[in-house]
Amino acid sequence: MAVTEPATGLENSEARPKGVATGREFIALVTALMATSALGIDLMLPAFPDMREQFGMPADSTQVTWIVTAYFLGMAAGPWMYGPASDRFGRRTPLLAGLALYAVAATTAALAPTWELIVISRFVWGLGAAGPRSLSVAMIRDRHEGDTMARLMSMIMAVFLLVPIAAPGVGASLIAIFPWRVVFWFPALAAVVLMVWSRRLPETLDVDKRRPFTWRSVADAGKEVITHRQTMGLTIAMTFLFGIMTVYLAGSEIILGDVYGYSSWFPVFFAGVAVLLAINSLNNARMVQRLGVTRLLRRTTLIGMAAAGALFGVSFLHDGVPDFWLFTLFVCLVIPAVQGLSPNCNAAAMTPLPHVAGTASAIIATITSAGGAILGAVASGAFDGTVHPFATYILGYLAVATVLIWWATARGRSSH
């Protein structure tokens, strides 16, 4: 049974071990660990034009988006190195190993002489990023469940979203001062700093709750996860939601530059949407307490579908090139709705399986990252110089996610 901290979810009134992060510091540290995955993406985006130029790609080439895709594929494979191991050995040691791999891969990318080696390094970088990402969720699940977990995940997400708000601007500023490969060096340094800070991280998995690390135990845990309707229905829904976010991350830069001619405004556009995402996450933390996870999930899908339908409609009516401000308006409605669904889906998917939280987190992270990366790559490859493919894929993916969320949260569907 999960240990739920007192009312705020942030403080513990009992005596705290000296030198160990608890309460707000624990939440801050977990947030920073989760943010490493976003830092490995968002800091890169302003460097895309420099990458195209250095490696001889056309100005409108989508080949550069392999920087994002390879990283996501690494994040998809990586959790299997961490989840089952963390259920056996605890969360801290695998997490520190992931941070070390993250730093080494980022350094390799910074020194890589060819595009191919950079892409390979990005895949390994994603393997490293998968540790902090998946194990942070497992650590939260060790301590919290249900609506409380969803509320804390939303609060963490609100702070976590400071990364995409700040990272493109930070990346652009760094590139203005240093060679563009500084966007690889900076995350490597951040990982080293977090390795030092993480020494204060408490072990959240008690020894008596650990599972043997054998093929049989991993297979049994995996079978339990993938046969649970609520968990798998919401996991597949999150895959399509992640696909939408990948479409947005990979496609917004080229749309602003090639469709609208506003490439220099991309960091401002990206940061503006991220501010809305952060505000939405804080609101989600409040609403999940009031409505509960299931009702909030269902309401948010309806809002998201309305916004996605409107984006598709204006794209269709304007031959794929709607007015920039109209495009921006509907992006600012649909992307926060999509992002708001993710922490609630994650909390609801993890709730039934506290005894295999590490393995469950690994399976969820693998499916969502791999599937989302593939879905995003398919959509990015369909770019035709207009907004139409962007709008079409977002609407289609969200429609599938909506059906799955309603099915998984239907009464009587939350058990095996």
Image (spheres, rainbow, N blue to C red):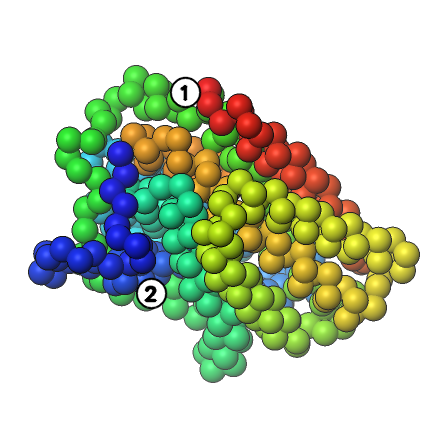
The x and y percentages for residue 61 are 69, 58
Sort mark 2 into few (<14), some (14-19) or many (20+) by Cα contacts within 10 Å.
some
Sort mark 1 into few (<14), some (14-19) or many (20+) by Cα contacts within 10 Å.
few
Residue 296: numbered disc: none
Residue 213 left/right relative to 226: left
Which amino acid, by three-letter code, is at mark 2?
A: Ala
Foreground residue among 255 and 183 = 255
Residue 396 left/right relative to 371: right
Residue 231 left/right relative to 47: left
Is residue 86 shown above or below 248? Answer: above
* Residue visible at 50% across and 79% down in the picture: 173
Is residue 223 shown above or below 15? Answer: above
Task: Please give the residue where the numbered disc 2 appears in the rendered image.
Answer: 190
Using the rendered view, name the quadrant where residue 263 is placed.
Answer: bottom right
The x and y percentages for residue 114 are 50, 56
The x and y percentages for residue 229 are 51, 25
Examine the rendering and report whether any part of residue 390 can be seen: no
* Residue visible at 32% across and 44% down in the picture: 144
How far is disc 2 from disc 1 in space, using C-alphas? 36 Å
Which amino acid, by three-letter code, is at mark 1?
A: Lys
Task: Please give the residue where the numbered disc 1 appears in the rendered image.
Answer: 223
Element marked by disc 1: helix
